[in-house]
Amino acid sequence: MLKKLKHSWWKILLGIVGLVILGLAFILVRPDSYLPHKRIALHAPYDLNSPPIALIPMGEKIYHPNTPHGHPGIDFQWASPDARILSSSSGTITSIGLVFDKWNKWEIDVSSWPYVVRYKEMETYNTALKVGQHISIGEFIGHPANPKIHNQVGAYQVHWELGSPGVIRDRFCPMTYFDAASAASVQSVYDHTDWQYKSQYPNVCNGFYFNRTG
């Protein structure tokens, strides 16, 4: 028995390596996300009666020069830290964490297979929320933070993303996923955003992310 194992150790090792490669490939590609599915229905991540004062669009490279496709989400900005960030989707909370980077802010991921909605750079979050919990559209997520890096002095923001669980598919432009009222609201916010680089990035989703829906 031992002699057989000695002669076949390389086969066992090869099998283990193969399984690791398959696992990594699944994580990167997530082939399940390409299966037929229902498009996610999104609401703006805020009360439409209390819209943000401005937003920083997807695809801009002014503040994100080293990101391959530019800004991978939308920064919704308010004048007050008391603004309430609301859930854009119904799904399962898959992660809640304090990200220890130069900002040290909270982020929450909500999964609605095969989509993931991410809320980043929050100062605080709703501590009643737990990983594994179901959340519905409109539920309170948290409060925005002041990153002190963008054009709006004193603005408080959440970095918001719609994406895939797979690394390769990256993020999507949410404009065609928003319900009609939300899409109109988000567009109106950007129309009224006073940003010096707006002529270079005229759309809510620009460059690589322009009309990118999957």
Image (cartoon, rainbow, N blue to C red):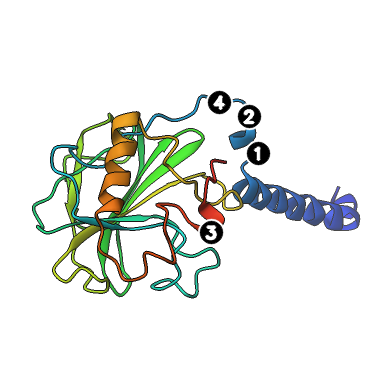
**In this picture, residue 146 sits left or right of residue 187:** left
> What residue did someone put label 2 on?
35
Q: Do the residues labelled 4 and 3 touch (CB within 8 Å)?
A: no
Q: Do the residues labelled 1 and 2 touch (CB within 8 Å)?
A: yes
Question: Label 2 neighbourhood size at 10 Å, few (<14), some (14-19), many (20+)?
Answer: few
Please name the residue shown 86% across and 47% down the image. 1
Real-space CA distance between mark 4 and mark 3, rounded to the nearest whole angstrom: 26 Å
- Which comes sooner in the sequence, label 3 or label 1? 1
Question: Label 1 neighbourhood size at 10 Å, few (<14), some (14-19), many (20+)?
Answer: few
- Which comes sooner in the sequence, label 2 or label 3? 2
Mark number displayed over residue 31: 1
Q: Do the residues labelled 2 and 4 touch (CB within 8 Å)?
A: yes
Nearer to us in this view, 76 or 207: 207
Mark number displayed over residue 207: 3
The amino acid at mark 2 is Leu
Nearer to us in this view, 96 or 175: 175
> What residue did someone put label 4 on?
37
Dot 2: element? loop
- Judged by depth in the image, the label closer to the viewer, 1 or 4, is 4
Please name the residue shown 76% across and 51% down the image. 18
Residue 50's spot in the image, x, y percent?
A: 13, 43
Real-space CA distance between mark 1 and mark 4, rounded to the nearest whole angstrom: 12 Å
